[in-house]
Amino acid sequence: MQAFIHDIAPKRSLRAAVFRAPFRKGTVTAIGKPALPRGYFCVGHEDIPGPSVLSYSGYSLPILVKSKVRYLGEPLLLFCGPNPEVLAKISASVELSYEEEPTVEYKNLSGPYREAQIINLAHGDVDLAFSLAEQIVEGEYRTARQEHYYPDTQGALADWDGKSLTIHAGTQDPFGLQLAIARCLNLPPRKVRVVAVPVGNTTEGKLLYSFLVAAQAGLLSYAAKKPVVLVYDRKEDLYCSPKSPPFQIRHQTALDRDGGTMAVRVQIFMDGGCYAPKNSEALHRAVHSAWGAYRIPNLEVTGRTVATDFPPIGPFRASGTAQAFFAAELHSSRLQEVAQLDPYNWKIENLAAAGGKEAPGSALAVLEEVTGLSDFIRKYSAYSAVKKRRKTIDQGTYPLRGIGLSLACQGEAGQWVDLHNIEVLRNSCTMKLVLEKGRRLRIYTSLVDSAMGIHAMLIHAAAELLELDPHKVTVQAVDTLEVPDTGPTILSHVVKVGLPLLEQCCRILQRKRKDGTLPLEVHRSLSPERLHPVKTDQAVRGKRRAGEDAAELSWAATVVEVELDPVTFQSTSRGVWMVIETGTVRNRTTTLGVLEGEIVRCLGSSRLPGYTAAATFAVPACSSSELIPAATGLPEIQIQILESQGAEMKGFEKLPHLGVPAAYAAAVCQATGLYIDQVPITEEVIQQCLET
Amino acid sequence: MPGNVIKLRFTLNERPVLLQCHPGTRLLDILRYDFGLKGTREGCARGECGACLVLMNGVAVNSCLIPAFTLSDAEIVTIEGIHSLKSFADIRKGMPESDVYRCGFCSSGMEVALAALLLTDPEPGEEEIRRSLSGNLCACGNYRGIVGSVIEQTSRKRRYGRRRVERS
């Protein structure tokens, strides 16, 4: 059985508690710290030796605040001691004086609010195209804040022995965490050792926030000079952890007489939360993905990050891209109606140059395959005919049915932003392999094992390349003293950097094996030039327009079929079909498992109520069953992978996030005959659309 | 506070135990911190995710919702008991393969729910398995893998059992 951070605390370690602000916004005027019993310790903002703000990938978060509180539950003081019940009493006896400030609800992000970042992107003559247009189609789309809901809450075990600090933490980036803690405690990085423990399915929630929890545990251990374990309970994790940013996206499309697209104007507003990032990778991704996968002759995109009073935002899987694709795909379903084409034919007409119609395993291939697999065209026509015959939504007692198709690509623009913006930059990413006697191979890497099957992927790739028994290949426990820095554990980084490094090491081992004696050791590194290629916005745009980066894109076409109760509007997914093209696939079983799991999560985030920002701790943020679908009521999920021989493996974990919500929304729109412009689509949302 | 402490006698993994604790202490905390049984995990802490399931008198219950005062004379079996006790040897044969889980956090709760099912129905169908797991959330969304593995294991057990009967 896996031992998570909750399971590893030694008995002699002190327990820790965080004293948090009980209000959403305001200024602390005084904190009356209680008298501490012997063996209990307190740490405040003034006790942090280094910088008190942690940064990662454009996002930032203070470890403890001095006076200015920006979100409910923002940490003010840290306590540790042997007895958790005494700690609870100490926290309850803190005397806090504060002046609360009113919060703005920001229902419409396009208001005159403070903007933290603006990005503009344009090509062609948009104004001219709009002036010549026969018809202009407009739409505004909204996506909600998303909660990570990792099964194991955040936690860290810190042990300061007077000379160095050892941190056990559930983190996706052990070396990033080492650097962050070293900065915060004003220590050289070599004096901080990080041992990574397994993490649950994180959706990238154990990057920035794992640093914050580890820094808090480290500060307490540094003060107490004893091991300290800090594990958040579910409530504080739900209320206080960073979320994915909500988006409001406006599309304006200029159409010619035949319904052909002449120009697109997109305005993107990202809710940057209370610590709105000045350089956000999510906004970059959203701007670069604003037109989905389609060919747009004249384009103008403006992206804005708006600073609001909502909880902080942080890294999230496919954040920015997923919302941009949702808006583009849903808007395309309106354009299809104008052009009087079905979704399949409209998509083929408007496919981007990238991918091309002739390219093997391209967008066209995944579209053709998924429509065949799901019998999309027949079902779409049948449901459309039923919709036309039905005059009102509440006519008849039979269930409402609809089917939706979406097309998505995961590619270089996102990848470039991933690597370019990460503030914890590496000099290089390295991997080490040791081949021992008995044909046993040990892989040394900082990539942690997670629900994405990273270690299984590395083991199977190495076993296949070196013709070894997979049972004899092991991955060394991730400890910064033992393993080299391979970068953060994000699946697309593993595919782009981890697997090529492993392949290089295996090739060298194969050569050395012929004349060398065991054990054999091989290191390989990727240089900063390979890791952080200098690419301007212009270069990325140019490449996408010219279709040069087709080989670097993974494609997915998704079909979702839904059935809604005509009275309650409760939806049931009747089936999900996804066809992907992602180059050469290593470990097919793991890939299919990852994709299916992500599809289930995305179905949940498309129809379950999800997270809502609460004003006080008395109001529940959300429950687990509002975030994760249960085993009952799940549809049949069919996934097909189209392999392109000889092509490199490409990232694929974001594809369900890009495709499923849009296909689900299109299916609900067809079933109800309503223009639904947001996700998640709950029964209440459908009812509201019906009323308005 | 001595007035707030109760003495409890119950059976834990087929062994009688005696414990002094606050009547409101959660069974989950008793198992994890008093007996060091870390296989029972805390997920949502409000009875929704099923990570903390244990068998109480043969029925799967969320230990985060069970206060200590209800434990008198109860028979508690945790995931450690299911994995090690002789009386669960037959049940273990119907459990999913260990490599079927992705992150593994939900595994103990899932297996307790399945043990409760297999105690009453040794050869459940897909519908029964899904229904028995309806109180367990898998953040990795790996339900099909888990259900498929249980079906495979129980049918393998059935085939093996039939062969043994034929031979005898």
Image: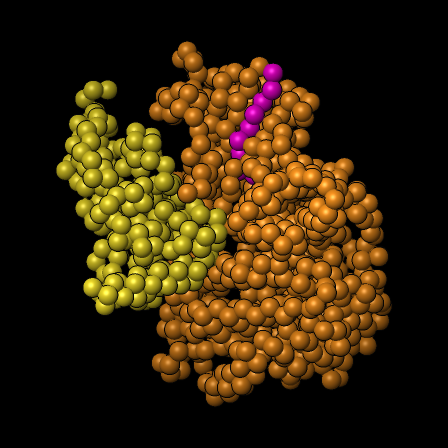
Chain colours: A orange, B yellow
Q: How many marks?
A: 0
Residue at image coords 76%, 77%: A358
The relative height of residue A658 versus residue A375 in the rendered view (above or below) is: above
Residue A216 x, y percent position in the rendering: 54, 27
Q: Is residue A389 visible?
A: yes
Residue at image coords 55%, 19%: A160
The relative height of residue A471 versus residue A480 in the rendered view (above or below) is: below
The quarter holding residue A486 reads top right
The quarter holding residue A364 reads bottom right
B12 horizontally vs A83: left or right: left
Q: Is residue A670 visible?
A: no
A380 horizontally vs B85: left or right: right
Please report the bounds of the magenta region as a residue range: A163-171
Residue A350 x, y percent position in the rendering: 72, 76
Residue at image coords 41%, 11%: A38
Residue A150 x, y percent position in the rendering: 49, 46
Q: Name the quadrant of the N terminus of chain A.
A: top left
The relative height of residue A336 versus residue A442 in the rendered view (above or below) is: below
Q: Is residue A620 magenta?
A: no
A289 horizontally vs A3: left or right: right
Residue at image coords 47%, 27%: A229
| Front-lying residue, A601 or A17 | A601
The relative height of residue A332 versus residue B135 in the rendered view (above or below) is: below
Q: Is residue A166 magenta?
A: yes
The quarter holding residue B83 reads top left
What residue occupies the far top of the structure in this picture? A38
Residue A151 x, y percent position in the rendering: 45, 46
| Front-lying residue, A635 or B23 | A635
